[in-house]
Amino acid sequence: MFRNCEDCVNFRKVAVIGCGFVGSASAFSLMQSGLFSEMVLIDSDRAKAEGEALDISHGVAFAKPMKIYAGDYDDIKNASVVIITAGAAQKPGETRLDLVKKNIAIYKSILPEINKRDFKGILLIVSNPVDILTTVAVKLSGLPENRVIGSGTVLDTARLKYEIGSHLNVDSRSVHAFIIGEHGDSEIAAFSAANVSGIKLDDFCEMRGHFEHDKATAEIAARVKNSAYEIIAKKKATYYGIAMSVRRICEAIVRNERSILPVSSMMRGAYGIEGIALSMPAIVGSDGVETLVPLKLNADETARLQASAKVLKDILAQNEI
């Protein structure tokens, strides 16, 4: 898909729509990554986009050559990835699902503009509630489903690995586990499929002197689910973690890594779920989502996943698209 020509996707170009905390942090992280040589920032407040572009550009001398500028929707046509972070911020005490109406309205103004530009790259949805907005983006963008993905539970999964690693006093990169379902209150920590370097989680816990598995996993899952609320209560917003997640997803796309990441994508029958985007492990590469990776879930996890999907579908049904 990624060839350099006037009418083709420029795999070295990225666009970020929305220059709030998450958008600007993501742009900064992408500048440092060296993945791209061109980045356009788009915001309803043009001066904000110009300021962020100028500020981040001043760090290019410490990184790799990169053209960073404020632009408009015409600048996205040949980008390899368009990242949408635009939306209302989550306030203290507010759930991600509370943002639905406000952010669907914002997306109704953004997606038709993308649709007009014959965009051929990958659309990465980051705004919350990300699973619902990924579904909305599929319906309104006109793009193939595999090319519309959400940041999903990539950050939640990183938080889960961090918590398990801390509990066991091992490198979190050796932990293989996923948060699945909604990026939100109905998310599921798929502990039955978790392992540490190929050793089942319970067995590894016992090897490290931990035996109260149900209590420990419940506490870990609660800390992961409540992480964002805690951060928002303390510093009003969360943006560094998601910015690093955006960078990781972009790496998988532009390098065609075919990495397995729990991104949000449309469900078409897996686990009996149809017609809603959910965060599930998927092979991610230059064409977006190649295929979902089936996890062997226990009966309780499967039921909770289906319940998570129903929550999202019910919320979506209350909002006209």
Image (spheres, rainbow, N blue to C red):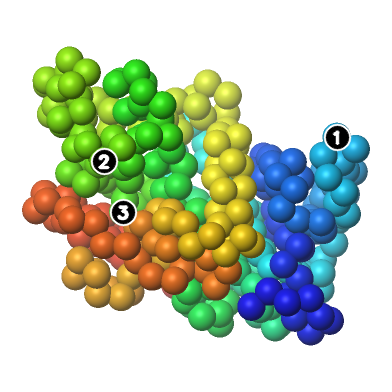
Residue type for callout 2: Gly
* Residue lying at the far top of the rendered structure: 209
Give the percent coordinates (x, y) of residue 64.
Answer: 83, 45
Please tell me how crowded label 2 is: few (under 14), some (14-19), or many (20+) other residues with Cα within 10 Å: few
Contact, CB < 8 Å: mark 3 with mark 1?
Answer: no
Give amino acid for label 1: Phe
The secondary element bearing badge 1 is classed as helix
Label of residue 181 in the image: 3
Where's residue 124, x and y in %?
A: 57, 61
Disc 2 marks which residue? Answer: 198
Q: Name the residue tied to disc 1.
A: 62
Q: What SS does tag 3 mark?
A: loop
Tell me how many marks there are: 3
Q: Hey, which residue is sitting farthest left in the picture?
A: 299
Of the numbered discs 2 and 1, the one sitting upstream in the chain is 1
Report the front residue among 20 and 65: 65
Mark 2 vs mark 3, CA separation in Å = 23 Å
**Residue 166 visible within the image:** yes
Q: Residue at x 26, y 41 (%)?
A: 198
Residue 285 screen position, x and y as percent: 53, 65
Q: Nearer the viewer, residue 162 or 84?
A: 162
Residue 106 appearing in the image: no
Q: Is residue 262 above or below residue 135?
A: above
Question: Relative to 210, is 76 on the left or the right?
Answer: right
